[in-house]
Image (cartoon, coloured by chain):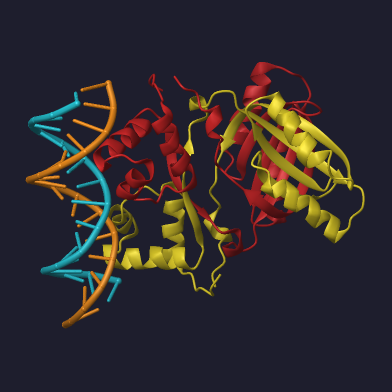
Chain colours: A red, B yellow, C cyan, D orange
Amino acid sequence: MTFYFMDAIDRRILDQLQRNSSLTNQALADEIGLSPSACLKRVNRLRDAGIIEQEVALLNPDALGQCLHMVVEVTMERDNKSLYQRFLTTALSAPEVKQCYQVTGECDFVLIVTVADLDEYDSFCDRVLYGDDNLRKFRTLLSRKRHKFDTSVPMESLRST
Amino acid sequence: MTFYFMDAIDRRILDQLQRNSSLTNQALADEIGLSPSACLKRVNRLRDAGIIEQEVALLNPDALGQCLHMVVEVTMERDNKSLYQRFLTTALSAPEVKQCYQVTGECDFVLIVTVADLDEYDSFCDRVLYGDDNLRKFRTLLSRKRHKFDTSVPMESLRST
DNA sequence: CGTGAAATATGTATCGT
DNA sequence: ACGATACATATTTCACG
């Protein structure tokens, strides 16, 4: 990522686009109080700099059919870098794994896994979890409902340089 | 949400937009093999029907300053609907709570909480967790790194009606 | 669903601060 | 270095077949 000086205007642009990226450049410029061309230049710079990573459509869960979310807590046997890396490579490439957090505490990784049904979850466990001989234990929490899903990040925590 | 019959073309449109919603309608129409007008009509219908809930920009974590993710497991005292609802109302309105899953298993809720620093996390705990007298216990897993964050949903699991 | 024309939006060049 | 205006290009949108 190229070095980038982010000012208050950039933060306001990001704040908007995090909530709604389907705004036209004109509407965004109006919101921010900038001319459309100046606004567009900033948005493109933020994109080129890799600060805006992607723009995606979030689908309504009610529009989804059978769709189960699992919270999977993974505890490794040995805390070894290359063994961790081996697990990560497998886990991150599994399409069922939507999120992966490396944590400190009573376990080592927390995965958010999304599958259509329990058969698919079994297949995931066989491929990713049972196959790793450094994986000591895992615990699955089956989600009955995802009440909130907010991809935004508070603007105070955005680096200014 | 209004009733909606979704066909294979709609699913391919959603599949694309879940990955990249910054495509122009023309580029999307090309991908799908539709005329721009037909494509636009479908996208607007999917939006109006609430299947496309929102379009957002995802920011690069490396562009963020201090930004801590916590996995918080919450266990309630009594499994009572209105007490659960009271907790949910508080938790969902807290801006630090980015995700909330109601689960079955060893605990009742799993929250993904994002804060700038530990002071902010303390404030969150005081406001949302310690304040609820039906909350029996919570466990915090501090994330050192978010290795993966994928907002997409597999298209096989999209309801066809 | 496709075509084509009118309405909008985006991108660029240039100038001013 | 940044923003505004204006113009050229591209895209969206709508009526009609």
Q: Which residue corresponds to the image point at 65% horizontal and 50% vertical from the top-left?
A: A148
Q: Kindly indicate the quadrant of the structure image that contains residue A74.
A: top right
Q: Is residue D2 left or right of residue B89?
A: left
In front of the other: B89 or A97: B89
Q: Which residue corresponds to the image point at 46% horizontal and 22% vertical from the top-left?
A: A160
The spot of residue B30 in percent (x, y) is 28, 56
The spot of residue D15 in percent (x, y) is 21, 78
The spot of residue B62 in percent (x, y) is 50, 25
The quarter of the picture where the N terminus of chain A appears is: top left
User: Please, is residue A64 above or below residue B105 in the view?
Assistant: below
The quarter of the picture where the C terminus of chain A appears is: top left
Examine the rendering and report whether any part of residue B96 can be seen: yes
Q: Is residue A116 left or right of residue A144?
A: left
The spot of residue A92 in percent (x, y) is 59, 35
Q: Kindly indicate the quadrant of the structure image that contains residue A6.
A: top left
Examine the rendering and report whether any part of residue A127 can be seen: no
Q: In this view, does A1 lie to the left or right of B140?
A: left
Q: In this view, does A28 lie to the left or right of B84?
A: left
